[in-house]
Image (cartoon, grey):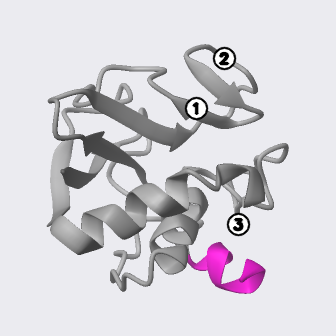
């Protein structure tokens, strides 16, 4: 099992803001993208603003190509998957705000916190620190 933390610049404001998401590849090779999108129930498997497989795993979000920020395997990846299985516990499934959050970066930070994984998001990840307020 492997979990990638991916990001891509946002359209028009990519120089100052990025969108993060998680890509989970299981032992069978099946790959799933988990993220928050500003549109509720937009497609794929959705719970409010939280989406699974709304877009291809490596697709950008309109402001440029995606990049891998971090990757976890083994036990750490397993903890992330367990946190994703509890997305109904995410307190902002039905709420989205570009600034200061909750947004896509808030969701990813929340998942990593609940998996016990520390990751230092850069300043361009607006909303990532909003998750600390909702532990």
Residue 57, placed above or below residue 129: above
Left or right, 51 with reference to 94: left
Q: Is residue 82 magenta?
A: no
Quarter of the image for residue 60 reads: top left
Q: Residue at x 75, y 60 (%)?
A: 89
- Residue at image position (24%, 53%) is 3
Q: Are marks 1 and 2 in contact (CB under 8 Å)?
A: yes
Q: Is residue 113 visible?
A: yes
Local secondary structure at mark 2? loop
- For the stretch drawn in magenta, the main secondary structure is helix
Going 50% across and 42% down the picture, which residue do you hit? 35
Instruction: Say which residue label 1 marks.
Output: 51
Disc 1 or disc 3, which is closer to the eye? 1
Please, what secondary structure does the residue beneath circle 1 have? Answer: strand
Which-is-in-front pick, marks 3 and 2?
A: 2
The percent position of residue 25, horizontal first and vertical second, equals: 22, 39
Residue to which mark 3 is pinned: 100
> Magenta residues?
129-135
| Residue density around tag 1, few if under 14, some if 14–19, many if 20 or more, within 10 Å | many
Q: Which residue is mark 2?
A: 42
* Nearer the observer, 7 or 30: 30
Q: Which numbered disc covers residue 116?
A: none
């Amino acid at each position: 099992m492997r979990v990638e933390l991916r990001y891509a610049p946002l359209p028009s404001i990519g120089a100052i803001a990025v969108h993060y998401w998680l890509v989970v590849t299981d032992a069978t090779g099946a790959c799933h993208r988990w993220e928050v999108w500003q549109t509720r129930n937009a497609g794929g498997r959705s719970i409010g603003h939280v989406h699974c497989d709304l877009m291809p795993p490596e697709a950008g979000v309109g402001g440029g190509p995606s990049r891998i920020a971090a990757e976890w395997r083994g036990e750490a990846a397993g903890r992330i998957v367990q946190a994703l299985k509890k997305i109904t516990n995410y307190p902002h499934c039905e709420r989205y705000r570009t600034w200061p959050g909750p947004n896509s970066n808030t969701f990813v930070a929340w998942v990593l916190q609940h998996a016990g994984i520390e990751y230092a998001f850069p300043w361009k990840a607006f909303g990532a620190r909003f998750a600390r307020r909702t532990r």
